[in-house]
Amino acid sequence: LDGIVNKRGINAAVRLILNAQEDSSDKSSDKDSMICVNIDDVLDNTIEVAQDQIQRRRYLYDRKPCRKGFSKEVFQRDLSEDDSPEGQSPWLTEDEFLQKYRMHRDSFKQILSLIRDHPAFINTGKKKQAPVEHQLLIFLFYIGT
C-alpha cells in the first residue's frame, strides 16, 4: 500500500507540473483535465485515509474470539474407554487415542500411576489445579504436535 501511495503521489506531482506548464503556455483551461485531476486527488486522499486506518489497527480483519484453555468435557470423552449404557462405542478408539496423544491408553495409565502422587500435582495455592490426567493429556498432545 505504501508503494501505491508513493507512486500516486509522484503521479500527482507530475500532473501538477504539467498542468502548470500548460497553464503558462496556454491560458485556456480544459474543464475535462481539471475533472480528471480532481478525481485523481480524491482517489489519492481515499488511499491515504485507508492506509492511515490500516496502520492504526493491529489486525486488518476482525478476529474471532479464541478459546481459552481446554474443556474438561473433551478430556473426559477422550479418557472414556468403556462402552456407554446405550451400547455406543468409546469416544476415541485405541488407534484414535494413539494418533491424538502419541501413546497407547495402557502406557498412558502406567505413566499416570507413576506421577499421580507427585508433589507437583498437589494444589497448594488458591487457584484450582486441573486433574493430573488432564495435565498429562495436554502435555502429550503438545509434545506430539
Image (cartoon, rainbow, N blue to C red):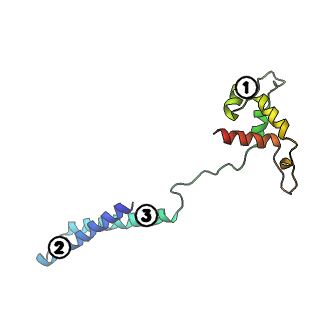
The image position of residue 140, as x and y in percent, is 71, 39
Disc 2 and disc 3 in contact, CB within 8 angstroms: no
What secondary structure is found at the residue carrying circle 3?
Answer: helix
Q: Which residue is mark 1?
A: 94
Q: Which residue: 60% across, 50% down?
A: 64
* First in sequence: mark 3 vs mark 1: 3
Q: Which residue: 43% across, 64% down?
A: 51
| Left or right: 143 in relation to 26 | right
Residue extending farthest top: 87
Res. 140 in view: yes
Quadrant in the picture for residue 141: top right
| Left or right: 120 in relation to 46 | right
Where's the N terminus, which quadrant?
Answer: bottom left
Is 24 above or below relative to 66? below
Q: CA distance from mark 1 to mark 2?
A: 83 Å
Where's the C terminus, which quadrant?
Answer: top right
Mark 2 vs mark 3: in front: 3
The image position of residue 84, as x and y in percent, is 82, 25
Q: Which residue is mark 2?
A: 29
Q: Which residue is mark 3?
A: 51
